[in-house]
Image (cartoon, coloured by chain):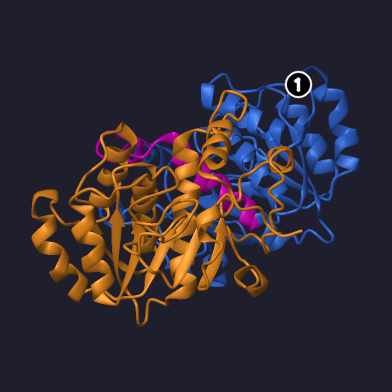
Chain colours: A blue, B orange
Amino acid sequence: MSVRYLTAKLAQQIDEELMSAAGAFSIDQLMELAGLACAQTLATAYGKDKHSRVLVCCGPGNQGGDGLVAARHLKMFGYQPTIYMPKPGSKDIYKRLKQQCDNMKIHTIPPEESNDALPKALKTSDVILDAIFGFSFKGPIRPPFDVALKSISDSKLPIVSVDIPSGWDVEKGNIEGVGLEPSVLLSLTAPKEGVRSFTGRHFLGGRFVPQSLEEKFELNLPPYPGFDQIVELPSAQRL
Amino acid sequence: MSVRYLTAKLAQQIDEELMSAAGAFSIDQLMELAGLACAQTLATAYGKDKHSRVLVCCGPGNQGGDGLVAARHLKMFGYQPTIYMPKPGSKDIYKRLKQQCDNMKIHTIPPEESNDALPKALKTSDVILDAIFGFSFKGPIRPPFDVALKSISDSKLPIVSVDIPSGWDVEKGNIEGVGLEPSVLLSLTAPKEGVRSFTGRHFLGGRFVPQSLEEKFELNLPPYPGFDQIVELPSAQRL
């Protein structure tokens, strides 16, 4: 039995169930573990010796929050993250996560300078963490992200995407051809339908799904090794 | 420069600073990372092949919350945790963490049966995670924990203690002689004065302290390896 690929609706449903009164998880907890998994994935694929300068690209939603958590952990791991976040989220948790990054002396490109500063930031980066759009993304891609995705693609830098590469349809993949083409993907909880065709290194994170929930949604998650927060999906999953 | 040992007051101050408006951390975040570090420490010291049955002993305060988080992660790692928690904490987060453990089908000894059930639970356990009292502990040890500590000690099971072995004075150590004698200790953020004489395996967790805070309090924390959440203190620290 291979791992289940989720529709956008199902991914949403699992998220809601985890954070319901019955599921009892707070968004702070889930985001902390998701962001830690993002940081560990990047550190596994791109060592800090040659890829210390990470441009962490954050969208305005929960995925952007994962990115901020990841930036903080990457800094702890000895990387030099910079945050590109042209549309900061308005939720309280987003502000707190940003403050935590400020306290760690992680540089954030000021939102009002984002457009001009992005090309320069790309030139001084070694790898991208793509936390722009998540499983609730619906096109079209609005400014400034339309221009941003193009700049990021043009940079030819290696990209680690979270959950769904930004610009891809969550269920149909990169059908518009404007999405990022990551070398590494971290799927959270379970992969989404749109990444079935993904051929790069594919990791799974979100080691917090109770067995009862896994069974209810027939996720068929692979076992995680040791006490890692991520597991690499076997190459069979990529064929 | 070796790592700084903290007074109870200083430990409290650092905790408050992390969770202040300026520090911006929520208790959910810090507890999640602390509990994950507890689970990783236990898994590092006691493999699940021979020590799968973990009795997670939780006090009514924040340390008990760390224990509940650890129990959940241990279950995820493939251990079989059981929770002993005779005085459940009243805070909302404590209830949510307990619910998460229930959802993972982790057995909790019903509080009203705790006294009678503890000796039996000890007989069917391989190792203890001691999350009863933390750095805010002040004696004397009140019932039912007085009897519980004696039962746990008498069991001769290996013990992994969190922050300060239960029953020890936070600054003076096991001066009353009634505290637990763990084989493994996980200090959170920085070790406390009371554990200077500890000679077992000593780990440090809490990889979330910003450098500015570390410098302000002159913590002299050792570097953590790779992307681990814990670091073992060198034997020099134990002499």
Residue at the location (36% across, 53% down)? B67
Circle 1: element type:
helix
Left or right of B125 on screen, residue A171: right
**Does residue A18 show up magenta in the picture?**
yes
Q: Chain of mark 1?
A: A
**Does residue B19 show up magenta in the picture?**
no
Left or right of A206 on screen, residue B89: left
Residue B209: percent from left, percent from top: 64, 44
Q: Is residue A143 above or below residue B26?
A: above
**Rendering quarter of residue B177:** bottom left
For the stretch drawn in magenta, what is the main secondary structure?
Answer: helix
Residue A173: percent from left, percent from top: 58, 45
Residue A104: percent from left, percent from top: 71, 38
Residue beneath disc 1: A111
Decide which of B137, A126 is in the foreground and name it: B137
Residue B193: percent from left, percent from top: 55, 53
Decide which of B209, B143 is in the foreground and name it: B143
Inspect the image, locate mark 1, and give the three-letter code of the amino acid beneath it.
Pro
Residue at the location (79% across, 39% down)? A152
Decide which of A85, B192 is in the foreground and name it: B192
Q: Which residues are magenta?
A: A16-41
Residue at the location (70% across, 54% down)? A77
Query: Which image quadrant: the N terminus of chain B?
Result: bottom right
How many numbered marks appear? Answer: 1
